[in-house]
Amino acid sequence: MQRIRKGDEVIVIAGRDKGTKGTVLSRVDDRHVVVEGVNVVKKHTRPNPQLGIVGGIVDKTLPIDQSNLMLVNPESGKGERVGFKMVDGKKVRVFKSNGAVVGAK
């Protein structure tokens, strides 16, 4: 079970975008995720009229390693560690600081 999933709000704890908050858009593989507004680079693209691609400089969001991210606790607004716990026979993610279930309203 993954500690960081699609749709989670995370904060970057290391690297060029340290301190930036964003939402996980997708998982690339078991180690890397794409986060909205994080690790954005400029990519120079060539025009390709057959595919309808206009050339120029395009912003592209690249994957970031999940070890550089922490889940944001909505109560404190800070990044916190996540563990697992059995609740009613289901394995759920919980914040280590206060034991609150991740995603519970």
Image: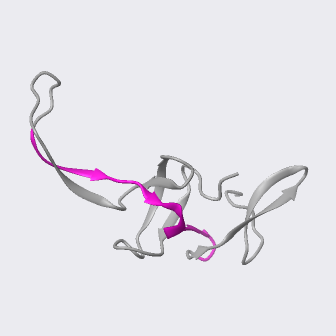
Residue 85 against residue 53 in the figure, above or below: below
Q: Check if residue 61 falls in the magenta segment.
A: yes
- Say whether residue 90 is left or right of residue 20: right
Q: Position of residue 84 (x, y in %)?
A: 77, 62
- Where the C terminus falls, by quadrant? bottom right
Residue 74 pos. (x, y %): 60, 68
Provide residue 49's location: percent of width, then percent of height. 9, 25
Relative to 100, does residue 44 appear above or below in the rendering?
above
**Residue at the (56%, 74%) spot, across then down:** 77
Q: At x 90% / y 49%, what residue is drawn?
A: 89
Residue 79 point in image, percent of width and height: 57, 74
Which one is in front, 22 or 104? Answer: 22
Q: Residue at x 71, y 57 (%)?
A: 104
Q: Residue furthest top?
A: 50
Residue stretch in magenta: 55-76
- Image point (15%, 32%), residue name: 53
Marker count (numbered): 0
* The one of 70 and 14 positioned closer to us in this rendering: 14
| Magenta stretch encompasses residue 64 | yes
Is residue 98 shown left or right of residue 86? Answer: left
Its colouring scheme is one colour
